[in-house]
Each structure stands twice: as structure tokens, then as C-alpha cells.
Image: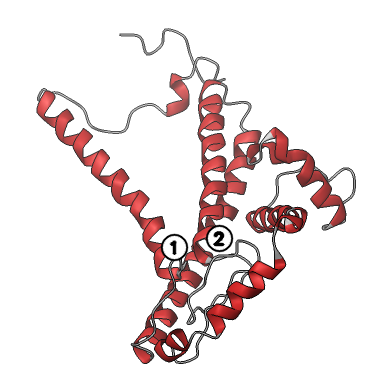
Amino acid sequence: SLTASLVLSTKELKHFHRFQRQELHLNACDVGKLPSIMEYTDFLAWREARRTNRTQSDFDPFALADELSAHLNSPTIEKQNCGFLQPLAEICKHRLHPGTSIQATRCPVCTVNDYVAYLEAIEAELETAGEAQRKSPKNGGYYDEILLAWSAAKLCCVKLLFQVEESAAAELRWTLQHPDFVLADGTMSAKMALEEYWEQFDHASDADLIGIEEHECARNVHFAEETNFDSGRGECYFWQKSPRYEPGRYAV
């Protein structure tokens, strides 16, 4: 079975085991298994909450109260924003857009980044398992497990992006209804989360296009008239460790 070490560092594993026992109440045999993407984000929120509780003694409550009082009693802000205040995310403490439709303990940007980090870790292991399977087709069980985990995580990520897109639309409607409202610095909106998510694909596409152009300029491929483009032998016949491989049969 898959373990949590696929997505968590060795340092974080002991905390994750404690989270599974204390919060999820799992049996000993289930502790340490790969979490779902939802359990993964819940664990990150739990860890952040514990860090916050440990560092509360470092804050000056009187200074914080003075800062909030100055903010709330500022006639300029009240007049400019019509009395609306931007909420703070419970865990990451980032300022949220007043029109957000997502009820979460973390802001949209942090939530999407957590999902992407989980997917990247699973994809890296999926690629490694795929290479191992090509070398030894008999050991494909592990690859199938990774593939199922990736499929479930990808589906959750798609659902999250749909919710973030709906929230971005709600934020836009709210902004149009309150044109004089000025967002605070550091506001983490759903629109920002989507922009950061899609930006990584834009960069990847540019790099791929550059590589393709250089490759096409470097060489041209020509096929002889007698070239046969029909499907040939199956892929498994190329693998020397495959039971279907016949040494020397397809040698030229």
C-alpha cells in the first residue's frame, strides 16, 4: 500500500502520524498510509494551527488591539469602503475578498497551492513507477496504485478549481456592486489563485514551443516510399523481461 512519505518529508511524517491518531482516530495499521488530497490539506491546516498556538505568546495583545482599534475607527476607511470589512482566513491569516463564496479555513491561493503540491508529488512518483514498470512489466501493481491515487487527486483538484472559478465570478459581481470599495494590500482572492494556477501552464507551453521550433530547425525527417506505417508488433515484444519477448525473432 502507498505511504504518506510520497507527499510528506521525513520531518513532517511524525506530525502526520499524530494527526491521524488524534484527529482521524485511525487504527495503528492505517497510520502512515497515503492521505487523500482532502486529508492532506486538513493536515496542513492542523499543523499551521498548532504553530500559531505555540507562537501566540510572542504577540503583544495590547499592540494588536491598538492596531485593530485604529483600523476600525478610521473614518477614511469606513467612508471609503462603506463600512465593509475584509475577513481573515482562519489558518493562513490572509485577507479574503468580501465577495468570496468559498467557506474555508485557508485562502484560495493557499488552498490551490496545497492541491498543486500534492499533485506534483504524486505525479513525480507516478513517472518513477511508470519507468520501473516498463523495465519489469510483471511488477505493475504499484504503478496501478499510484495511478488510482493520482486520478482521485486530479478529480478533487478539478472540483476545487470549479469552486474557485465560481468564487471568482462571485467576487467580480460583488466588486461591480461596490465600485468604491478598495481592497486591502495582500488580499488573496479567487481570481489571484486562478491566475497563479494557469500561469504555470503558460510558461510550460512557451518552453515546449521553443523546444519544438529548435528541434524542427535542427533536422528534417524523410521516409522512403516503401515505409510501412501500419501498426507493428505490440509494445510488450520490445521488453526483454516480458514473457512475450522472443530473442532474435525481430532482429534485422
Cα–Cα gap, marks 2 and 1: 9 Å
Nearest to the observer: residue 109 or residue 212: 109
Above or below residue 30? Residue 241 is above
Instruction: Name which residue lies at 60% across and 76% down.
Output: 68
User: Does 201 sit left or right of 90 as displayed?
Assistant: left
Above or below residue 79? Residue 210 is above
Above or below residue 112? Residue 187 is below
- Residue placed under numbered mark 2 in the picture: 111
Q: Can residue 226 be seen in this view?
A: yes
Q: What element carries label 1?
A: helix
Nearest to the observer: residue 23 or residue 122: 23
x, y percentage for residue 218? 12, 24
Say which quadrant the C terminus sits in: top left
x, y percentage for residue 141? 65, 35
Amino acid found under the numbered disc labelled 1: Ala
Say which quadrant the N terminus sits in: top right
Instruction: Name which residue lies at 45% across and 84% down.
Output: 77
x, y percentage for residue 239? 48, 19
- Residue placed under numbered mark 1 in the picture: 193
Amino acid found under the numbered disc labelled 2: Thr
Instruction: Name which residue lies at 17% across and 29% down.
Output: 215
Task: Tell me which corner region of the image, top left, top right, bottom left or bottom right, holds residue 210.
Answer: top left
Mark 1 nearby-residue class (10 Å; few <14, some 14–19, many ≥20): many
Above or below residue 120? Residue 242 is above
Q: Are marks 2 and 1 in contact (CB under 8 Å)?
A: yes
